[in-house]
Image (tube, coloured by chain):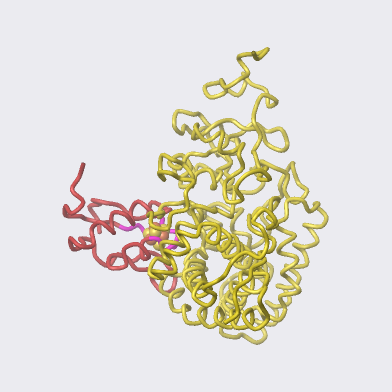
Chain colours: A yellow, B red
Amino acid sequence: MSHDPTAVGTTTGATTDDITADDLPTLPTDRHTGCPFDPPEGLTALSDEPIRRMRYADGHVGRLVTGHATARAILADPRFSSRYELLHLPVPMGGVSGEIPPAPAGDIIGLDAPEHTRYRRLLTGKFTVRRMRQLTERVEQFTEECLDAMEQAGPTADLVEAFAQPVPALMICELLGVPYTDRKRFQGHVATIFDQTADAEATGEAYTALLQYLAELVLAKRAEPTDDLLSDLTTSDLTDEELAGVGGLLLAAGLDTTANMLGLGTFALLSNPDQLDALRADPGLAGQTVEELLRYLSVADPLLRSALEDVEVEGALIRAGETVTVSVQAVNRDPRRFPDPNRLDIHRKATGHLAFGHGAHQCLGQQLARVEMAVAFPALLSRFPTLRLAVPPQEVPLRNRSNIYGVISLPVTWDKE
Amino acid sequence: MSDPQAPLRLGADRERCAGAGMCALTAPAVFDQDEEEGLVVLLHPAPAPEHRAAARMAVGLCPAGAIALGSPDS
Ligand code: SF4
């Protein structure tokens, strides 16, 4: 028996004054046990309540959202702000657990309308469904080149290094106008920025170095424009600093997210041979498979918002100033929205997942990511019909402490013809 | 519940649109995005029966609530 029955399981209807932060759960992030594709066990255990109180890294009492409908409502509601300086971190990130500085120039994720809208409008036209589809041929070309190199060098290969990283990196570099040959200069910085275990100093240095690199590039583009997004943007009213910031954000997002979806996604498919066979038998399922993998893996997590005023959601009163953590991985496994959610099933209609977020900030690059994945997975599987893990699944190293989940490496092998 | 094939009148609000392209992806016969800003373009405010289900789905998926059913304006 608990010595204090009121402290257990009764937090829902309580007002902020009734409870102390110590009674509350923190955000479970420990994935070390169990299936590498499932959300942390502690998180799944909380998912019966779509919204609940939670303790943040700095002691703040805010909310955790694990319900799909609740998440959609909050993310689409302009009364919830994305401004960094209003947020509290659910877990320490980049060595920071307390106050977050405001968004630096060009970092549109940390802004609200109308500032956010101004930047976003400059960019959306460059990432339309039609434009991204026109890139399909380039993606196919890059994919084949990477597969050629992998085939020649192997077997075996680290799929992350040979395939999952280079395909999206080549694409985002070409789109932005960043020389791919410079990638050694920024790839490490990007990994550090997303690494929750890096200390504040290391994260700050990585960020500064990335921006420094882009600032040089922006100057070069102004002097000599080429046919790419950064050059295009030099004709807008953005300052050099804003341009470097926007470029850094797009580069980081474009490099790391899709790369982790490709690496972890391949791992998931190899671990589910029935699904793998179904996709091999019918490459027409590629689009649907991509949606299901996005839902099932939800690599970019969580999303944060802060209430600008008192808002009632699902009978819960969220007070002005409270931070809400939307756990995308929990939301995308909400059984009320996706039946049998813990099953990877490429025949299901997974559209409506929130892997790209929701609301005004929904991922700008999502159509590019879709094209890349819809090309890459089938190409990989048809090139290597006998592709399999080269190590036992438990030995695949996971990115347990990164804001973008994935595999650190994925040793694979295949039979040589 | 409502008949999925019932006639449909759509409205699109370009001020609210976030340019995420879910509409053009889901119901390409009904929605497009313009080339400059990537904002929603409503191709058919009263879509043909075979496109109505996709159009309804697009309304549900739009992240910004920028497209609506039964809006009096086009
Ligand atoms: S889905 Fe909504 S936000 Fe996205 S382009 Fe269409 S109308 Fe705009």
Helix, strand or loop for the magenta stretch, by majority: loop
In this view of the protein, which residue sits in the foreground, A339 or A301?
Answer: A339
* x 65%, y 59%: residue: A407
Q: Is residue A147 above or below residue B1?
A: below
Q: Position of residue A204 (x, y in %)?
A: 78, 58
In this view of the protein, which residue sits in the foreground, A199 or A242?
Answer: A199
* x 68%, y 12%: residue: A3
The residue positioned farthest toward the right in the image shown: A201
Among the 4 quarters of the image, the one containing residue A288: bottom left
In what quadrant of the picture does the N terminus of chain A appear? top right
Q: Which residues are magenta?
A: B12-22
Q: Give yes or no for residue B16 being in the magenta stretch.
A: yes
* A87 to the left or right of A281: right
Among the 4 quarters of the image, the one containing residue A300: bottom right
Q: Give yes or no for residue A361 being in the magenta stretch.
A: no
Q: Position of residue A363 (x, y in %)?
A: 52, 59
In this view of the protein, which residue sits in the foreground, A274 or A364?
Answer: A274
* x 57%, y 23%: residue: A11
Q: Position of residue A394 (x, y in %)?
A: 67, 53
Q: How many marks?
A: 0
In what quadrant of the picture does the C terminus of chain A appear? bottom right
* A239 to the left or right of A75: right
Q: Position of residue A225 (x, y in %)?
A: 61, 85
Q: Is residue A372 above or below residue B67?
A: below
Q: Is residue A103 above or below residue A214?
A: above
* A95 to the left or right of A406: right
* A83 to the left or right of A95: left
Quadrant of ligand 1: it is bottom left
Q: Is residue A174 above or below residue A23?
A: below
